[in-house]
Amino acid sequence: MLSYLSQRETNLQFKVHHRPPVMSVKPSATATVGGGGSSSSSTTESPPVAHKFGGSSVGTAARIADVAAILLSRSDVDGRQVVVVSAMQGVTDALIALCRKAAARDDSWVVDLLVLQTKHTDAAKALLTGHQDSLNGVIAKLTGEFTVLSELLRAQALIGSVSTDLIELIQGLGEVWSSTLLHAHLASKGAEGESVWLDARDVLVIEPGPLGAAVQWGPSRAKVQQFVATHGVSKARRVIVTGFIARTTEGRITTLGRNGSDYSGAIFASLFDASELHIWTDVDGVMSADPRQVPDAVLLARMSYEEACELAYFGANVVHPQTMAPAFARGIPIIIRNTFAPQKPGTRIGKETDTTVPVKGITTFGNLALLNLEGAGLLGVPGTAERTFGALARSGVSVVMISQGSSEHSICCLVQESVVERGQKALEDAFTRELAQGLVSGVTITRDIAALAVVGDGMAGTPGIAARLFTALGAAHINVRAIAQGSSERNISVAVAKADATRALRAVHAGFFGSSAASVLVVRIGVLGPGNVGQTFLNQLDAARGSLLRRKNLDLQLVGIAGSKKMLLFTPSAAGDINASSSSRYMDAKARIDREGTALDLAAFAAHVRQSNDANGCAIVVDCTASGGPAEWYQTWLTQGIHVITPNKQAGSGSLKRYEAILAATRAPFAGRFYYEATVGAGLPVMTTLRDMVDTGDVVMSVDGILSGTLSWLFNTWDGDVPFSALVRRAKEMGYTEPDPRDDLSGLDVARKLVILARETGSQMTLDAVQLESLVPSALRDIPTDEFLTRLPEMDGPMKATFEDAKRQGNVLRYVAQLKAVVDDATGAVESYRATVGLLALPKSHAFAHVKLTDNVLLFSTKRYRSNPLLVQGPGAGAEVTAAGVFGDLLRCCGRR
């Protein structure tokens, strides 16, 4: 195979690379060329400007034409241009696939080869319309090359195995073809498009090594100088160079490997002693962060070589450090430009940077793991680090980041997750004796880790950089697993959970760069309980979100809904996406959950809402259930920074220990906030009124209230002429009562509301401390609902007697909750509160005697409002007003009310 390949390689090179030029080139003066580590530019000529165009820039005939237009329109056309060209997009991969298919004896390679040939011949026809002679020459050249390529692939199929030498030979042909097309198209422009074509394999000599391709600068420079002398490269002359490909010192065709075309650009910029290297790609330049993860990423105008290398090392899509090495060595600035927006200035990478912007970029990359060597026996022992990293090096494990505390108790390093077990075994083998003696407690692994790096030359000596970094991470509730910073202060790196990487990136970016949409608050909302109140809340949310975005810069996005057994999670909409498609998720929530939902997992539900959260937004769980289950999660959610809004009375009136834990969670740094206005009085400003009085130092002496819309309606309506049971049945038919009317008649719901009010004053009241008078006779309390409804008339006699007794005294019946302060006689201080709930006979002059049907009403008597109590009255029941109370809390939570 080697002898056959050597002969075929010679034939292919003769046909491809030594064909007489299709375009004529006029002789011109010789230019002196520099390279490697020294400059030898002519003093009578301005140095050339190097340009490198990537595969996306030359992906089609139209794009190749655009590249030519860019070159012709640039001001450096008055000097010389060295233009390095990648293969058309996808061609290199297609060529490698052809080799593998042929080796696997997959005959479809024949069709694939024809498709590839047609792609290039069609491009030639489009680029050379009206220039038939040039077109005929290019088509003939392409036809000859594809014929030889077909013969090589047939030989590969006969052998039946992949030949590395053949892949090296073939995979670089794409650059030959694309550069030929660009050269021919430029030549068709006449004198202004004059250019010469340079096959890099004729001049570029490399030596493959463990660190990649090492350029042999002396031989390469000599060959370039010979090329210049032979072809008369002078002013206004473009040299079109094939990227990616070269020859070894033995003369074998090879490639420059990963990022080889960019590397070629820097190499030829150095060999031709260029004043600048413009790398043309499909982005505007280097961004402050990956715009796919951080929509508010900004374009960086300038950065240093060192900054670019640091960002590239941590996965940023800048340029590969190896690419920059030749330009770095010669001090040649690199400008990253957008082929599709050539008017934009791009990012300039050079010796100098803008130190007024201390942080240039923030980047993350994942698929990492933490490897931790720990033990008391490591303290002060010389050579521990050497043994650690020597063992990892011998096992082939590359260390991404190192973190060691000053106590020397542990050494922690970040490695690729794919090799972490190999690294663990290497360390266990290296410290076998210490592990056996207990001097080393163990070598542990933490998986699913990502690294986040903050990079900038201006960070050195600038106080507060680390503080801003960790403040931003803390505000986003990101736990930092390890920290590393070099003495240059150019880079601060942290290890975080991979699941938190995007949120961490957004939070830190906002901390350093702010946000172009800072005035717009993106709110990610998860709703529990798609029942009457929950669905009404969703309807109100959908109806108002467009207006709130326009008037309040508030972008409300529903990202999840959940019932008692199932949940449905949504992908967050794009910011400001108020349309019919995004609106559909708000409709018919219960039916959608039943139809499309997955098993309920409250941890996953909250994690989804929280994961959607970023630095310029907030995450909110709205609990519209009446269940105690979600309340068990409030403390966790609040600690995670998720705000909780609810009309559910379970948390406020349930376990005192749980209630106090919830409040404590809200006081933690960066915790979520807890809003529960609608738990008492639905949409009435009850809790905010009471909270404002207490927070401003007022002392509550008593609270009297009608806190049940159902019971309010019953006793406002009942005139004694109809049986009380008939009125209860009517209320149930109208939807005023719960399905089991005893839930209202028992007064337990009112008692829960009174406990919530008491606790708002600072009391530690529990539900069992409330003196509760139930309207349901003891004989009817524990029977099935259907039986209770049948036996409901048993209540009529006692209720009628109570009514008549109140009427005789000129009173009316009202079901009232009362909270009374117990005052120390000596000091006048409030020691505690006494709570009662029950049926009272009140004079007709009482404020509660004239409330409207379903109204709730509360009288607050405080030290400030003692002589004239503060009254709050209005509808206190119904889905519309309860949902409105929840919505009002949401706006307060977002600071938009």
Image (tube, rainbow, N blue to C red):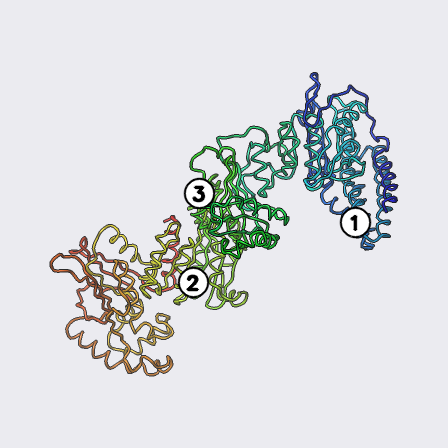
Mark 3 and mark 2 residues within 8 Å of each other at the beta carbon: no
- Count the numbered circles shown: 3
In this rendering, is residue 21 above or below 683?
Answer: above
The quarter of the displayed image where residue 665 is located: bottom left
Against 481, is 280 above or below?
A: above
Q: In the displayed structure, does residue 522 sit left or right of residue 680? A: right
Q: For residue 125, say whether it is visible.
A: no
Please name whichever residue, 430 or 878, is drawn nearer the observer in this view of the structure.
Answer: 430
The amino acid type, in three-letter code, at marker 2 is Gly
Q: Which disc is residue 98 wearing?
A: 1
Residue under numbered circle 3? 519
Horizontally, residue 173 falls left or right of residue 686, namely: right
SS type, badge 3: loop
Residue plotted at (54% across, 41% down): 289
The residue labelled by disc 2 is 534
From mark 3 to mark 1, how far is it between C-alphas? 53 Å
| Sooner in the amino-acid sequence: mark 3 or mark 1 | 1
Mark positioned earlier in the residue sequence (2 or 1): 1
Q: What residue type is labelled 3?
A: Ser
Describe the element under mark 1 as helix, strand or loop.
Answer: helix
